[in-house]
Image (cartoon, grey):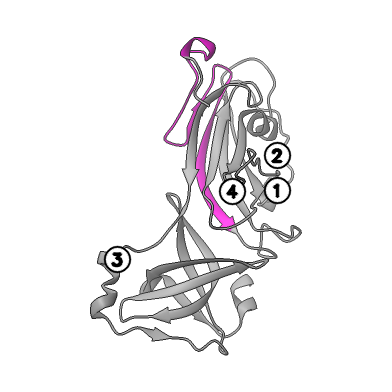
Amino acid sequence: MTPDESETPAEASFADNVLTLPEYTIKITDAKMIAVVQPGNEYSQKPVIAFWYEVTNLSDEPIDPTTAWISSFTALQDNDPNAVNELNVGTLPDEQFLDSQLQEIKKDGTVANAASYELDDETTPVELVASNDLGATEIGRATFTLQTLSAEQLRLNSQVVTVVPDRMNVWGLAWLRFGDTDVRSTVLVKRWTADAIGVEVDVDGDKLRCWIWQGVCQRLQNRVDGWR
């Protein structure tokens, strides 16, 4: 939904990953997808998208980084033809914030934190929606999608493509691009050319495939080697 300008305070905005409200600002500093059982997502049965951020208190009112985030953002995946699919909040994806996630922020003070949402699949983009009234009035949104190499970059019509046999599992630790953010994930190598590698991420039967450059993928002897 697009809010009417008269319903949204002039001071409120969400642009370039920064939410500005009269009471506080939230600056998203990083975002990445974390597969099941990898560090930061050890307990969920689903992959998550995690966000790292900083909250600056602009008022004399008490606020903590967790409450500020939950009050300001919802995450959606548009994979239901009949209903809005709001993602469930996940566990804290970064243990360094265990003691500070509910820390009261002084006026003009800044405290960092992290939050996560459980993904329903790894193919549908995630839309992070900002509001100043628990989602009733939208201020803005940002979309995070996994990107692949273009046909022009791949040049498959002029390249030799080596395909991994179905009976073989070749694992890698690769940098993927999720929205504007680089994400390091354990992947299954399916094919390659002299320049690029076709990889697959499989979570609970949902397969996401993309092409990446050779230089961003490290060969693993076993899948679990990428979790260490």
Q: Which of marks 4 and 1 is in front?
A: 4
Q: Earlier in the sequence, mark 4 or mark 2?
A: 4
Q: Distance between the residues labelled 4 and 2?
A: 31 Å
Task: Name the front one of labels 4 and 2.
Answer: 4
Q: Mark 2 points at which residue?
A: 101
CA gap between label 1 and label 2 equals 9 Å
Which residue bears the numbered disc 3?
151
Q: How far apart are marks 3 and 4 (CA)?
A: 26 Å
Residue shown at 65% from the left, 47% from the top: 117
Horizontal relation, residue 149 to residue 69: left or right: left
- Reading the image, the residue beneath label 4 is 79
Measured from the top left, where is residue 192 in percent x and y? Answer: 39, 80
Please tell me which of labels 4 and 1 falls first in the chain: 4
Taking the image as shown, residue 147 lies to the left or right of residue 118, namely: left
Front in this rendered view, residue 172 or 137: 137
State the extent of the magenta-drawn residues as a range. 5-33
- In this view, 186 is above or below 140: below
Q: Which of marks 3 and 1 is nearer the N terminus?
A: 1
**Badge 3 element:** helix
Categorize mark 3 by other alpha carbons within 10 Å: few (<14), some (14-19), many (20+). few
- Circle 1: is it few (<14), some (14-19), or many (20+) Cα within 10 Å? many
Q: Which amino acid type is marked by label 3?
A: Ala
The disc at residue 70 is: none
The amino acid at mark 1 is Leu
Determine the image quadrant of residue 83. Answer: top right
| Residue 153 x, y percent position in the rendering | 27, 66
* Distance in Å between CA atoms under marks 4 and 1: 25 Å
